[in-house]
Image (tube, helix red, strand yellow):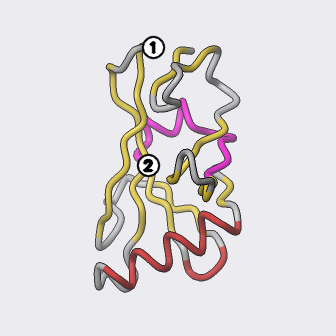
Amino acid sequence: MIQVSENASKQIAKLLAKQDLPGGGLRVGIKAGGCSGFEYVFGWEAAPRDSDQVFEGDDGARIFVDPKSLRFLDGTVLDYDTSLISRGFTLSNPHAKSTCGCGHSFSV
C-alpha cells in the first residue's frame, strides 16, 4: 500500500486538471540506476494499466504502481514538499536502506 498525504493529493489533483487528464493519475515506479542503485520515476497517465495497483488519496488523486515497483514501494508515503529549497514529490520509503543526497535514488 502507498499512502498519499494531503499535500500530495492536492498537488496531483491540481496537475491532473492542468494537463486535462480527468480520471488519470500519477505513475510512481522504480528503475535500476541513480547514485544508490535504484531511482524513483514519475509520470502522468490517463488510466492505469491492467496489472497496476491503484491507490487513492483525497481530492480524487490516484497513484498507479506496477507490481515490480510495488515490491520496493509497499508501505511508502508520498508527500509533496512546498519548501523554498526543494519543491516536488517526496517518498518516505521504509525499504530504503540509504538514499543519495538528492533523494531521487536509494538502495535496499
Q: Position of residue 56 (x, y in %)?
A: 60, 68
**Mark 2: few, some, or many residues within 10 Å (few <14, many ≥20)?**
many
**Residues at marks 2 and 1 touching, judged by CB atoms closer than 8 Å:** no
Residue behind mark 1? 36
Question: Local crowd at mark 1 within 10 Å, few (<14), some, or many (≥20)?
Answer: some
In the rendering, which numbered label is found on residue 28? Answer: 2
- Residue 72 quadrant: top right
**Residue at left offset 63%, top offset 54%:** 83
In the image, is residue 84 above or below residue 10? above
**x and y percent of residue 4 in the render?**
65, 60
Identify residue type, mark 2: Val
Can you say whether 56 is above or below 21 in the image? above
Q: Is residue 20 above or below residue 94?
A: below
**Observer-nearest residue: 50 or 106?**
106
Q: How many labels were placed on the picture? A: 2
In the image, which is nearer the foreground, mark 2 or mark 1? Answer: 1
Please tell me whether mark 1 sits on a helix, a strand or a loop: loop
**What residue sits 36% from the left and 64% below the top?**
48
The three-letter code of the residue at mark 1 reads Ser
Q: Earlier in the sequence, mark 2 or mark 1?
A: 2
Residue 27 position, x and y percent, is: 39, 55
Range of residues picked out in magenta: 66-78
Residue 80 falls in image quadrant: bottom right
Q: Residue at x 70, y 29 (%)?
A: 94
